[in-house]
Image (spheres, helix red, strand yellow):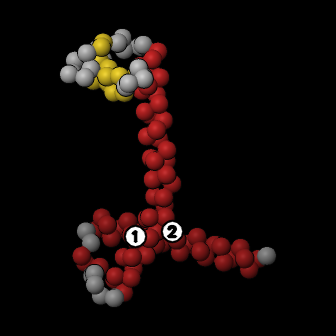
Amino acid sequence: MPYVARAANGAIAAVFPREAPDAREHLAANAPELETFLQSRLDAMAAPREHLEATDHDMARLLEDLVDVLLGKGVLAWQDFAPQAQRKLLFRKDLRWHLQRRAADDAKRL
């Protein structure tokens, strides 16, 4: 049973699960106006989430490169990583090596 607070223009500004000082108006859970408001909030949240997810790959690569640099400079030791983390890093490094090798082989064939 949602309660809504309204903006000065009458549009829904916020939704609460129970009555609140600024939200005394009760709406049916399936009220079209409420559904429109909730969908607009979901849509507004989706864009930043999509941008964040789109950069995950680049961020993972950056962190892998950072780990390599810190290991190379002796700032970190391989043993500083938990065995699970070591396996994940080695697995990704191995995958990248195979992909680079395949790309080099493909380039030679052209």
The quarter of the displayed image where residue 78 is located: bottom left
Whether residue 18 sits left or right of residue 72 in the image: it is left
The correct choice, above or below, for 37 with respect to 107 in the image is: above
Residue 10 in view (yes/no): yes
The residue under the point 30% across, 12% down is: 26
Q: Which residue is mark 2?
A: 95
The correct choice, above or below, for 97 with respect to 48 in the image is: below
Residue 17 in view (yes/no): no
Amino acid residing under circle 1:
Leu
* Nearest to the observer: residue 75 or residue 78: 75
The quarter of the displayed image where residue 64 is located: bottom left
The quarter of the displayed image where residue 1 is located: top left
The correct choice, above or below, for 5 with respect to 48 in the image is: above
Q: Farthest residue to the bottom: give it.
A: 73
* Nearest to the observer: residue 53 or residue 107: 53
Amino acid residing under circle 2:
Leu
Whether residue 78 sits left or right of residue 102 in the image: it is left
Q: Residues within 10 Å of mark 2 (few under 14, many from 20)?
A: few
Q: Which residue is mark 1?
A: 63
Marks 1/2: CA–CA distance = 16 Å
The residue under the point 48% across, 35% down is: 43
Expressed as whole percent of the image width and height from the top left, the position of residue 96 reads: 52, 71
Figure quadrant of the C terminus: bottom right
* Nearest to the observer: residue 74 or residue 10: 10
**Front position among marks 1 and 2:** 1
Q: Farthest residue to the right: give it.
A: 110
Whether residue 35 sits left or right of residue 98 in the image: it is left
Expressed as whole percent of the image width and height from the top left, the position of residue 62 reads: 44, 70
Callout 1–callout 2 Cβ contact below 8 Å: no
The correct choice, above or below, for 38 with respect to 53 in the image is: above
The residue under the point 49% across, 52% down is: 51
